[in-house]
Image: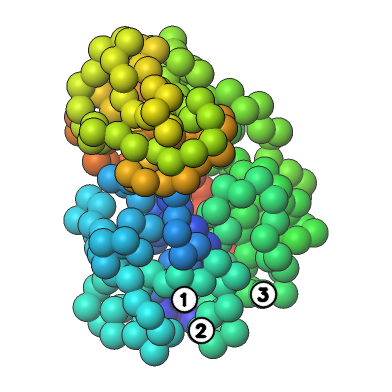
Amino acid sequence: MSLSSLKVLVRGGGEQATAVAHRLHQGHFRVVIVEAPHPEAVRREVAFCEAIYDKEKTVEGVTARFIGSADDIFGMWEKDIIPLMADPEAKVKTVLKPDVIIDATIAKRNLGNKMSDARLVIGLGVGFTAGRDVHVVIETKRGHNLGRVIRLGEAAPDTGIPGEIMGYSAERVLRAPQAGIFTTSHSIGDIVKAGDIIAEVDGMPINAVIGGVIRGLLRNGTTVPKGMKSGDIDPRGVKEYCTTISEKGRAIAGGVLEAILAEFNV
């Protein structure tokens, strides 16, 4: 089988899923993304799922376009565009018959994936057991094993603590102070100071704890539960980082690519 003829179904269109889809597309695999009808990405500038709202989304020169039917998949591939569908249960797999399925939803649980679904089924992060419900798990926790290909067992447990940047961890993350409607006058890429009001939830402010650049922010009008991650601030203040794939995403995508090549490049 030619590697360029491999059909890869990516479940999820958020930051990490986008990093994976981008890497595989650049390697000339035929990639399809399936997402929820109303995705809630925070790092929207590096999330292909934004195509559901804006019809298409380009990240580092690669474009994903929203399609309404599986009949449009091959036409997108011919145009060198990644097709993206609203199909949270990945029902298109019965028609597409993908060679590889990658669950990149970061749901922290298995959303119904089985090893019988494809020749190679990959799960990103916690919620999967390699050798039981998926063939391979990719480590997504920052640290020494980030991007590691796990062929038996599970990824490291989720601590719930964001990775550190310049010594800041939980301080970087903006969370909803109450349940309600998220609104903001800020945009991704804005430079802010500690104490600035970044957004509100039904009139209750969300203040920046640290200064830096807004790297992620929910869409205006999103309904949020209390405590939901609603944005994040990068203390390095480099605007370019808002629109480019992170080192974490690239490491995870590298692990996925390794797993695919190990299975098919024989």
- At 62% from the left and 54% from the top, the residue drawn is 123
Q: Is residue 74 above or below residue 61?
A: below
Q: Secondary structure at mark 3?
A: helix
Task: Name the residue tied to disc 2.
Answer: 96
Q: Are marks 2 and 1 in contact (CB under 8 Å)?
A: yes
Left or right: 37 as drawn, with respect to 22: right
Query: Which image quadrant for residue 75?
Result: bottom left
The answer to whether residue 23 is visible is no
- Furthest-right residue in this view: 132
**Comes first in the chain, label 2 or label 1:** 1
Screen quadrant of the C terminus: bottom right
Task: Name the residue tied to disc 3.
Answer: 117
**Comes first in the chain, label 2 or label 3:** 2
- Where residue 174 sits in the image (x, y, percent)? 43, 26
Circle 1 packing at 10 Å, graded few (<14), some (14-19), many (20+), is some
- At 71% from the left and 33% from the top, the residue drawn is 157
Task: Tell me the kind of residue under disc 2.
Answer: Leu
Q: Secondary structure at mark 2?
A: helix
Give the label on residue 7, or none.
1
Q: Are marks 1 and 3 in contact (CB under 8 Å)?
A: no
Q: Secondary structure at mark 1?
A: strand
Which of label 2 and label 1 is nearer to you? 2
Circle 3 packing at 10 Å, graded few (<14), some (14-19), many (20+), is some
How far is the residue under mark 2 from the one under mark 3?
Answer: 11 Å
- Where residue 46 sits in the image (x, y, percent)? 32, 46
- Where residue 111 sits in the image (x, y, percent)? 67, 60
How far is the residue under mark 2 from the one under mark 1?
Answer: 8 Å
Q: Is residue 201 above or below residue 252?
A: above
Left or right: 258 as drawn, with respect to 127: left
Task: Tell me the kind of residue under disc 1.
Answer: Lys
Task: Tell me the kind of residue under disc 3.
Answer: Asp
